[in-house]
Image (cartoon, rainbow, N blue to C red):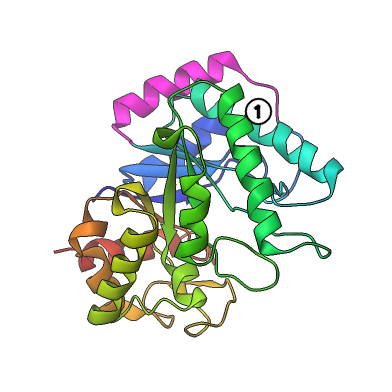
Amino acid sequence: MRIGVHCSIANGLLGVLDEAKSLNCQTIQFFSRSPRVWQRNKINTLEIKEFKERQKFLNIYPLTLHTPYLPNLCSSDDKLYQHSLKVFIEDLEYTGILGADYLTFHPGSYSEDSNSEEGCKRLIEALNSILAKVKNRVVLLIENTAGGGRKVGWNFSELGLIIKKIREKKRIGICFDTCHAYAAGYAISQKESLKKTLTEFDRYIGLEKLKLLHTNDSKKPLGSKIDRHEHLGKGYIGLAGFRLILNHPVFKKLPAILETPKDNSRSDKRNLTILRSLIS
């Protein structure tokens, strides 16, 4: 298992690698642009060239980018939908330019005057359109959600339906977030229920679609449908739960990214130390 964190892009691409190096990361994730704005920075070819050289030297892989929070490919609002399509196309192209492996995203929420079926239909149409327009080797990863509100993609049957209707099957996969799964009602902290969860995942989606693991504890209880990440061992999944998850044959072969709270400059280092100690 290759281990890393979600790095800040506040200091640019080279700042991402500085942070990764300081934490001895083997893999990293970072936002494709500032997470709460639509605009992206101008592409700096010299910075990208140096980034690629340093990334290769540091032996950091795989590389994962994460889309910002604003796009919503499930929306019935045509203006928002078209704007979201534009961002996804730009970010998928950018991910390819960087030579990264994955672009992870939250599937989105259906509109108030709509339903989950219609939201999923909009998402499927969007993903097929995006993949048809951008021809590179990047794999889009749908991140399972905690549910709640009008969010789609919290249960495996729904995720499976989406995956099955994507035409370019090799370019779509799943990023499995432990906090989101637990909050959605999957009791992954217990041996038998973890086995049941993975059996269900395989039935609806296929274990071969698991590409990335987000290792986050949950501040809220099982089935709460509330997405609140917590430090490892301080949430409801707990250290025993993570020891079980991290050493399971299905998850152990995946790269793992921490998205735990960054309370201070030592938070990531502390969580990484705990994460490494749990892997046998």
Q: Position of residue 20 (x, y in %)?
A: 40, 43
Q: Residue at x 30, y 43 (%)?
A: 26
> Is the residue marked by circle 1 packed among few (<14), some (14-19), or many (20+) residues within 10 Å?
some
Q: Is 53 in front, or is 164?
A: 164
Task: Return the x and y of residue 141 as percentages of the image width and height.
Answer: 47, 45
| Residue depicted at 22% across the width and 68% down the height | 278
Asked whether 165 falls inside the magenta stretch, the response is: no
> Residue at 54% of width from left, 20% of height from top?
47
Q: Position of residue 97 (x, y in %)?
A: 52, 21
Type of amino acid under label 1: Glu
Q: Which is nearer the eye, 134 or 64? A: 134
Residue extent of the magenta highlight? 41-61
Whether residue 241 sits left or right of residue 159 in the image: it is left
Q: Quadrant of residue 126?
A: top right
Q: Is residue 47 magenta?
A: yes
Residue 100 placement (x, y as % from top left): 44, 30
Q: Is residue 154 above or below residue 8?
A: below
- Along the horizontal axis of the image, is 210 left or right of 1? right
Task: Give the residue drawn at x 59%, y 38%.
Answer: 127
- Residue where numbered disc 1 is placed: 90
